[in-house]
Amino acid sequence: MQAVLDGAEKQGAKVKRYDLIKLNIQHCLGCCKCIFDDPKLPIGRCPIKDDMAAVLEDYIRADGYVLASPVYHGTVTALMKKFIERKFGLFRRDPKDIGKIVEARVLANFKKKAVMVATANSPDEFVEVMGDPCFEVMGSDWMIEQVETVGKLYVGSIDALSDAEMKNQLETAFEMGKKLVNEIEKESIR
């Protein structure tokens, strides 16, 4: 992840890194107050008082996103899943619209871009069973938010990479960060 951020910074982006493990992010209570109450706000109000409100404030101001997770038991970590569930406040739904999908409070109109990184002990040939499920979870909200995914990187056998292989993967990640910024800049020109 840091190599992606370094590449983005090299292209002139201002980056901010959140290490979820260092944040106080509580489990979603499933109360749905965040999607039903105050539908005109850009972020729904959650009754949980933790770090997530500040993270979401930065999230809606950002032009691009980098999500990264190791693969744990075939998917993203529980911590990443908790973060994604708590992004629910970015959506709204009328309480009488039971059975309908939520809608984004603020649409990105595909001007915001994102990349994802998944790392695993399984070799690269397991990308479909190890990496792809992670990418599906991490990018699950982006179609509703209208955020375009412009890069995915699966780094398999992470613990067994030679120095040369690790250098190559880090260079790939760095270039992905540069591409992320380039894609965002293309949208600002349009």
Image: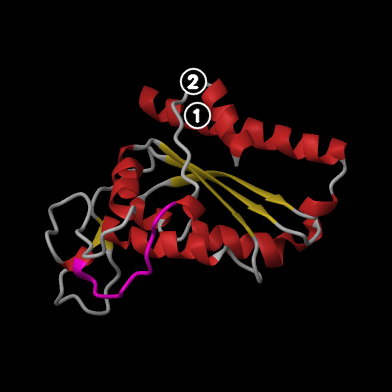
Q: Percent from the top left, x then y, of residue 132?
A: 63, 61
Q: Is residue 114 visible?
A: yes
Q: Is residue 178 visible?
A: no
Q: Which residues are magenta?
A: 23-33
Mark 2 surroundings: few (<14), some (14-19) or many (≥20) residues within 10 A = few
Marks 1/2: CA distance? 8 Å
Q: Which residue is at a point 80% across and 55% down the rendered structure image?
A: 157
Q: Earlier in the sequence, mark 1 or mark 2?
A: 2
Q: Which residue is at a point 81% across and 58% down the rendered structure image?
A: 123
Q: Are marks 1 and 2 in contact (CB under 8 Å)?
A: yes
In this view, 181 is above or below 88? above
Q: Main secondary structure of the magenta part?
A: loop
- State the SS at label 1: helix
Residue 167, labelled with which disc?
A: none
Residue highlighted by disc 1:
181
Residue flagged by tag 1: what amino acid is it?
Answer: Val
Looking at the image, residue 125 sits to the left or right of residue 67; the answer is right
Image color mode: secondary structure
In this view, 59 is above or below 31? above
Q: Which residue is at a point 86% across and 36% down the rendered structure image?
A: 164
Q: Quadrant of the C terminus?
A: top left
Q: Which residue is at a point 37% across and 26% down the rendered structure image?
A: 188
Residue flagged by tag 2: what amino acid is it?
Answer: Gly
Q: Quadrant of the N terminus?
A: top right
Looking at the image, residue 82 sits to the left or right of residue 47; the answer is right
Residue highlighted by disc 2:
12
* Residue situated in front as seen by the camera: 54 or 90: 54
Looking at the image, residue 126 sits to the left or right of residue 48; the answer is right
Mark 1 or 2: the one toward you: 2
Magenta stretch contains residue 180: no
